[in-house]
């Protein structure tokens, strides 16, 4: 089972960059809601010939796709390597090419978040690692890290024959500040960043660009499931509040566009100024 780092926000049309993806074919994972849905909507507004919305929640992806022209949905568990390969092969069969892939699917751990929130309320350090079951560790790594590998591998295979393409992965600022009590999520996203950068170096010579966006707190379904005490802990009057899915989508689509032709292996930290690296 996967999930998406997303919630069901609709957002308005900013009109930014109209036509950047004219005639291109795109695949977005985690597109049933939140960041993934915002990505699909913006790609549709910017002229894609076709956009395929993939999500473990096939009904959610279909609901978004039904509101967009030249869009279709597919139920996809990114942790299933064969399913990812089949989904990408189907895009090639139907559309004949794949120009843009944005990988936004991922999961968090609601139980760990509850433990962290309880510790905040009690005024004590979180105690998570000693309580973390193998199944919880494996679930987060399987979806976030293995799933990213599956999507990157399939996308590279699809793009190599044309020696062109742009892949953008949604990482996390948690990979960089490694929040206490969230070892499996931080490790999975740090792995996602390193994996993406290694692949970026490998394929840039073949005309394929791979880049990463590392969001901070963003108003998604994942954020909506965050306990209030933990959400309050993210609040900082010195910086911007939670980003919107549309704001993160716009950064990702800049990386996917020709305007970012000189960027490969970049990790863009989009956390509203909470910290820098």
Image (spheres, helix red, strand yellow):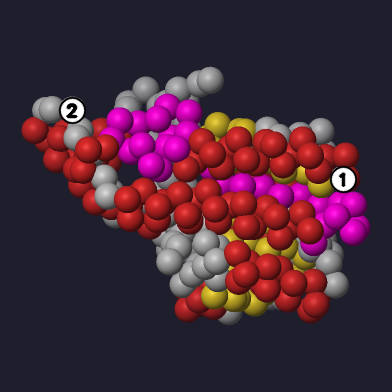
Is 10 within the magenta? no
Could you say where residue 114 lies in the image, as x and y percent from the top left?
Answer: 20, 47
Residue drawn at x 58%, y 79% as measured from the top left = 66
Kindly give the residue lying farthest to the left in the view shown: 122
Q: Residues within 10 Å of mark 1 (few under 14, many from 20)?
A: some
At horizontal 20% and vertical 33% (from top left) the residue drawn is 126
Question: Tag 1's secondary structure?
Answer: loop
Would you say residue 182 sits in the magenta stretch? Answer: yes
Question: Relative to residue 10, is residue 259 depicted above or below?
Answer: above
- Residue at image x 87%, y 45%? 207
Where residue 240 appears, x then y in whole percent? Answer: 42, 32
- State the residue in front, 208 or 157: 157
Numbered disc total: 2
On residue 125, the disc is 2
* Callout 1–callout 2 Cβ contact below 8 Å: no
- Outermost residue on the top side: it is 277
Q: Which residue is mark 1?
A: 207
Answer few, some or many: residues within 10 Å of disc 2's Cα (few below 14, many 20 plus, some between 14 and 19).
few
Q: Position of residue 205 (x, y in %)?
A: 88, 39
Mark pair 1, 2: CA separation: 47 Å
Q: Tell me where the magenta segment starts and ends, as one range.
A: 158-187
**Quadrant of residue 214 in the image?**
top right
From the top left corner, tell me how far across and down residue 80 is, in percent.
55, 66
Q: Is residue 53 left or right of residue 114?
A: right
Name the quarter where the N terminus is drawn: bottom left
- Residue 52 visible within the image: no
| Mark found first going from the N terminus, 1 or 2 | 2
Q: Is residue 118 visible?
A: yes
Q: Nearer the viewer, residue 204 or 48?
A: 204
The residue at 80%/61% (across/down) is 158
Q: Nearer the viewer, residue 198 or 11?
A: 198
Task: Check disc 2 and report its element: helix, strand or loop.
Answer: loop
């Amino acid at each position: 089972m996967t999930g998406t780092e997303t919630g069901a926000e609709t957002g308005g049309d900013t009109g930014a960059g109209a036509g950047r993806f004219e005639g291109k074919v795109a695949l977005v994972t985690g597109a049933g809601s939140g960041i993934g849905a915002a990505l699909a909507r913006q790609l549709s507004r910017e002229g894609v010939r076709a956009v395929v919305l993939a999500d473990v929640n096939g009904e959610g992806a279909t609901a978004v796709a039904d509101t967009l022209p030249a869009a279709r949905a597919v139920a996809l568990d990114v942790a299933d390597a064969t399913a990812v390969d089949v989904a990408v092969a189907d895009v090639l069969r139907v559309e004949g090419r794949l120009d843009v892939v944005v990988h936004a699917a991922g999961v968090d751990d609601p139980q760990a978040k509850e433990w962290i929130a309880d510790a905040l309320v009690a005024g004590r350090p979180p105690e998570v690692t000693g309580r973390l079951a193998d199944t919880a560790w494996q679930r987060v790594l399987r979806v976030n890290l293995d799933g990213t590998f599956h999507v990157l591998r399939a996308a590279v295979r699809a793009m190599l024959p044309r020696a062109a393409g742009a892949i953008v992965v949604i990482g996390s600022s948690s990979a960089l500040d490694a929040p206490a009590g969230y070892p499996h999520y931080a490790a999975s996203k740090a792995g996602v960043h390193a994996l993406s950068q290694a692949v970026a170096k490998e394929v840039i010579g073949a005309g394929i660009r791979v880049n990463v966006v590392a969001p901070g707190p963003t108003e998604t379904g994942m954020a909506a499931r965050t306990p209030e005490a933990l959400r309050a802990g993210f609040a900082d009057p010195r910086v911007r509040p939670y980003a919107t899915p549309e704001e993160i989508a716009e950064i990702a689509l800049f990386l996917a566009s020709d305007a970012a032709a000189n960027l490969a292996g970049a990790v863009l930290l989009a956390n509203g100024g909470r910290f820098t690296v």
